[in-house]
Image (cartoon, grey):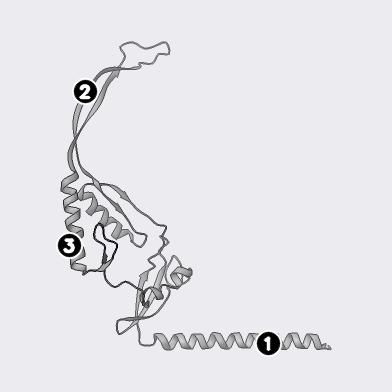
Amino acid sequence: MGVSRRDFLKISGSTLLLGQVAASASADAKEQEIKIKGAKETTTICPYCSVGCGIIVHTKDGKVVNTEGDPDHPINEGSLCSKGGSIYQNVNNEHRLLKPRYRAPGSTEWKDVEWDWALDQIARKVKDTRDRTFQTTMKTKVREVKAADTPDEGGVYAPVVVNDVEKEFAINRTDGIAHVGSAALDNEECYLIQKLVRSWGLVYVEHQARL
């Protein structure tokens, strides 16, 4: 079978392109192997949306050297979206905040503070707010009704208002604090947080799974 000049160029170009792709893929795989050689492998969950994709983290001397999708994870089976695929940059980033930041009331400046100070402030404000807004009981009007002594034309014993009385109920809650959950929390963490904030008397408890 004869091969025209055009067909020859097509075949040669395709062969050359495939060879370059294969060589590039081989080089990338070799570079990846060198990068993670001797590194400690740890599994974690992506901190972004609520899908909960599994990620493998490779660390050397306490520093993250590589992140990739976990092929053994039942949710993503090794695949990651663009946000999950770039999670390596969250750690190795010169703009990453390493300390809590605090802005005083009325101030326009943020300043770095220590974790112990920040946690003490949070605990104090939660305690003060709860003490100030905690309600043990609540009074409300309750309408007492009873069924009519005789049925109506349709044979229904319609309810009849007997009296409106004010009653006091135990509520043990605070309306001064709200809690918003995180998409990065797993089921066990959500359970513990619910137990904690409910024990404080919080009723405004929300969860977000969109960031």
Which quadrant of the view contains residue 104?
bottom left
Residue density around tag 1, few if under 14, some if 14–19, many if 20 or more, within 10 Å: few
- Name which residue type carries label 1: Thr
Local secondary structure at mark 3? helix
Q: Residue at x 28, y 56 (%)?
A: 191
Q: Height in image: 174 above or below 152? A: below
Disc number placed over residue 165 in the picture, else none: 2
Direction from residue 201 to residue 28 in the image, left or right: right
The image quadrant that residue 98 belongs to is bottom left
| Residue labelled with disc 3 | 120
Query: Which quadrant of the figure has residue 58?
Result: bottom left
Is 80 on the left-hand or right-hand side of 62?
right
For badge 2, the amino acid type reads Val
Examine the rendered structure and indicate whether residue 135 appears above or below residue 117. above
Are the residues tagged 2 and 3 within 8 Å (C-beta)? no
Of callouts 1 and 3, the N-terminal one: 1
SS for tag 1? helix
Secondary element at image label 2: strand
Whole-percent x, y for residue 136 in the image: 16, 40
**Inter-mark Cα distance, 1 to 3:** 66 Å
